[in-house]
Amino acid sequence: MTNPLLQRWTGPHGGVPPWNLVRPEDFVPAFEVAIAENKKEIDLISSNDEVANFENTVVALEKSGQMLYRINAMFGVHTSNLSIGPMPSIEKQVVPMLTEHQDSIIQNADLFARIETVYESEGLKSMGVAEQRLVDDLYKRFVRQGAKLSDGDKERLSKINKRLASLFTNFAQNVLADESGWITWIEKQEDLDGLPASVKAAMAAAAKSKGQEGKWAVTNTRSSMDPFLTYASNRELRKKVWTNYYNRGDNGDEHDNNGIIAELLRLRAVRAKLLGYETHAHWRLEPQMAKTPENAMDLMMKVWPKAVARVKEEVADMQKIADESAAGITIEPWDYRYYSEKVRKAKYDLDFNEVKPYMQMEKLREGMMWAASEVYGFKYKQIYDNPVFHPDVRVWEVMDAEGEHVGLWYFDPYARDGKRSGAWMTDYRPQSNMDESITTIVSNNSNFVKGAEGEAVLISWDDADTMFHEFGHALHGLCSKVKYPSQSGTSVARDYVEFPSQINEHWLMTPEILNKYAVHHKTGKPLPKDLIEKIEATATFNQGFSTVEYLASALVDMKLHLAGDVDIDPDKFEREALAELGMPKEIPMRHRTPHFLHLFADDGYSAGYYSYLWSDALTADAADVFEEAGSYYDKEVAKSLHDNIFSVGNTIDPAEGFRRFRGRDVDTSALLRKRGFPVD
């Protein structure tokens, strides 16, 4: 018990993670102790001589495993944000341990018998809605994960789950290796033609951080790749950067993921059959809003042909400009972003290079926090004495309108070695209110590229949109007001969890944010009105590209997981599935199969990448409520959003929460209008 990872978190507000005391070598022994402790807790519940009831079984389970949860929270941050040194090897040890332990809980026959007793009891009907939902979800989760299988099938299932856990880790580490290992080095000034000064400065800083001062580096992450493909005049270098990025996990070397994917898909299909489901997709979608793969496919295919038609228009516009410039090229995937910007300039007289000097990460971070204070009544105070896991990380205390403590928000904005690419929210501790009020701790993590020392970090419009999106997830956790931790914050259906985050994106475009927080990094002057009007005019510009690159990934995901128990060559399947869909040759999938972390780093978004579109249908329809009220800061609408969506967690059916806010079920035509596609 001298291991610091085993200690209760100390400090104010229920304690904070002791990042300053964490040593990688402490994780394995800490997990061994915490798992043993949790087994004792489970044994006490399952062997209780008293008749099973809500308190001695369901609530007891809610209170169990707190030590294990704390260690796992810190472990997850290290594997996502600090996967360097011994951490990859430690992760390969720990993940199977956790999987085996989780299976032992699900497969505990005495424990499940008690849960089933509560589930079937007459007393359940007289409980509150949250309690009934908690029991219903708990019982069905156990069943869906194999609690009713025979002993032989349980053993078989455990072997599958343990193997899957190892494959997930291997897949993610291979992607991280290709993100760290494939860098495009630039040594000639002329090869930077077309790039904004801020992008060149960030590339120089990246090269310097890797010991190559005097050069420029395009690292193999989206935040580095995207601006280079958008602005660099050198077509051959654009192709090289594009190829490095989209071939992650697909280079035929020791980090190639195709064999891992094939095995993952086989095992998932076998597991689904073992659990009584037609395919992995049917198993995954049963507890979601969509309920069935067919419903998810129906929505995607409602949008797909309209998006493809728009891409043809976009490519024609780009090809015309390429022809007029005598470039002598046919538009290829590494040209799309570059010529799209030229079309934007020609059609709308908008060059995002003119916008970027106003897009300071720090000012926009202030803006999104200010917007949340207006909508949800939050106040913030930066605190400096909390331990952090890296010098880049900062911490804020979040308080309500009365000054009462709500939670802590950690912000880790910059890319670095050992940090996975992309942007995400992490829940260190869920809010709950059983025996005592437990406040939440959440974080947002990004991969912005640092500029030169002392200079403002300028980000793209898309990066700003993503920052607001991820803060929406954090707000979902911070607004939570529930009793039971497993119903807290973002613990909702996968195809609903993106709704709160997507609707938060809308505050970026509000005049209040743009006029006060989109200010020039040198002059301090706000974004000019004419530029704002041009941005508004291009709201649906390039929606063909953004919709098709996303939907192609979502459709291939669903097709992979509907294929069943067959041998799959991932590259071949991807090519054939895209050809069958009529995928435009000028666009790649947003996430090609060999590096599709959403699908193959865990089960999280497998057969579930459609969720972003499903949630966006809700978002588009819900945003109309604010539009009709005349402001995204309308107090009445904001209160309804808080009360029916952000604060209730998983205590009510998400469809009911949306219905209470919108006054009816979702109208998906709003989704098509938002993207500028024909409704009929």
Image (cartoon, rainbow, N blue to C red):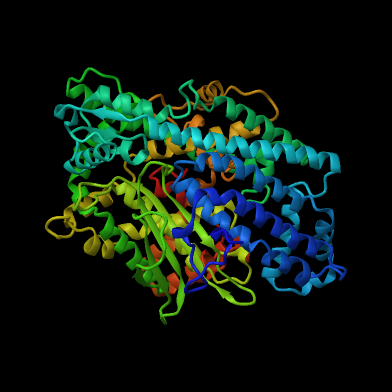
**Residue with the most extreme top position:** 328
**Residue with the most extreme bottom position:** 402
User: 54 or 170, which lies in front?
Assistant: 170
> In the displayed structure, does residue 62 sit left or right of residue 320?
right
> In the displayed structure, does residue 428 sit left or right of residue 520?
right
**Residue with the most extreme front position:** 2
Q: How many marks?
A: 0
Q: Quadrant of the N terminus?
A: bottom right
Residue 394, percent from left and from top: 36, 61
Residue 594, percent from left and from top: 50, 29
Q: Is residue 46 above or below residue 261?
A: below
User: 471 or 85, which lies in front?
Assistant: 85
Q: Is residue 405 above or below residue 226?
A: below
Q: Quadrant of residue 363?
A: bottom left
Does the image show residue 618? no
**Residue with the most extreme left position:** 523
Residue 179, percent from left and from top: 40, 34
> In the displayed structure, does residue 338 sit left or right of residue 255?
left
Residue drawn at the location 60% of the way across and 48% of the way down? 28
Q: Is residue 355 above or below residue 245?
A: below
> In the displayed structure, does residue 18 sit left or right of residue 192?
right
User: 634 or 504, which lies in front?
Assistant: 504
Residue 424, percent from left and from top: 45, 51
Q: Quadrant of residue 273?
A: top right
User: 565 or 625, which lies in front?
Assistant: 565
Does the image show residue 179? yes
